[in-house]
Amino acid sequence: MLGLGYVVFSAIHFSFQLFKTIIYQIQYLPRFQIMSKHDSSLSKDQYNLLKDLKKQISHPQPKAEPVAPVVKTAEQEQEEDLDLFRKQMQGVQKIDAGNIAKIEKSPKKKVDAQTLAKRAAAEGPMHTDETVLSDTQAMLNPVGSQASLSYRIATLQHKVFEDLKAGNLRWFEAVDLHGCTVEEARQAVLQIIQIAKDENQNVIKIVHGKGPEAILKTYVNGWLRQHRDVLAFVSAPEKQGGTGAVLVLLKRAEKNPKFKQ
């Protein structure tokens, strides 16, 4: 066993000494003194291998310096994103919208008192639940042309009233009382309330105007406080008429046979 180990050690030692001799010849002898490629002791492949090894030792390759990352501004990144988007969108065609139907919501129209009078003449007098609106309260409580009107029953929820005041509740129908006599205005108010009840709607708008003496505004304020179907009313937001109109909240016509489930 010891004899075999000695043989292996001797072979390794001899190989190492041979490698040191070759390295010494490459480093310290002039190029022309290196073993000739015609030397019978070396094959052609061995000679070329030694030649390449000497080149690597004499002229080592420089280490590549690490490349610093390029810092881009937000504008540059945005421009690159836009360029990428344009490239991706090349060849994309816009869909022809010629065959798409246009859906336009028809604006609500205000009905004037004269129109309601003509409708009543053509269809006959409208049933208005025999509601009697006295002028006494209006005469005793006149309001100014710029005054804001506000009324609510005690049991109405505060949030509902605030939504009405803010104009968040969409009104179903509106009537314009400009140019009406007091009696025409009274009938128009009764009819617009009845129309809303017949359609089971609970928000309407009444445009009374801001005349110097606010006559119609005063009467509307008094009439609405007496009507049994009125839960609340308030001067409209500026964009819906301001102090020249009121938004009215009505009771739902739950017992109307037309709307029974």
Image (cartoon, rainbow, N blue to C red):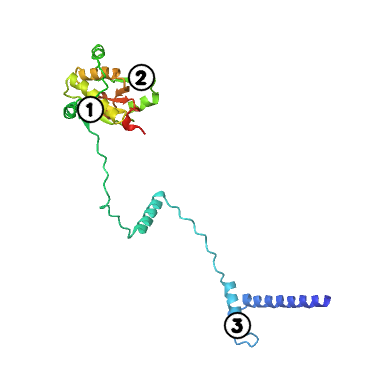
State the residue at coordinates (27%, 22%): 129
Residue ID for mark 2: 153
Q: Residue furthest front?
A: 257
Three-letter amino acid code of the residue under disc 2: Ile
Three-letter amino acid code of the residue under disc 1: Val
| Quarter of the figure with residue 135 | top left
- Left-right relation of 48 to 90: right
> What separation in Å lies between label 1 and label 2 (alpha carbons)?
23 Å
Depth check: give the residue in front, 40 or 204. 204
| Quarter of the figure with residue 197 | top left
Q: Residues within 10 Å of mark 3 (few under 14, many from 20)?
A: few
| Quarter of the figure with residue 173 | top left
Q: Does 96 appear above or below 19? A: above
Mark positioned earlier in the residue sequence (1 or 2): 2
**Secondary structure beneath label 1:** strand
Q: In the rendering, at what x and y percent does residue 145 appear? A: 23, 19
Q: Does 255 appear above or below 8? A: above
Mark positioned earlier in the residue sequence (3 or 2): 3
Residue ID for mark 1: 175
Residue ID for mark 3: 45
Mark positioned earlier in the residue sequence (3 or 1): 3
State the residue at coordinates (80%, 75%): 5
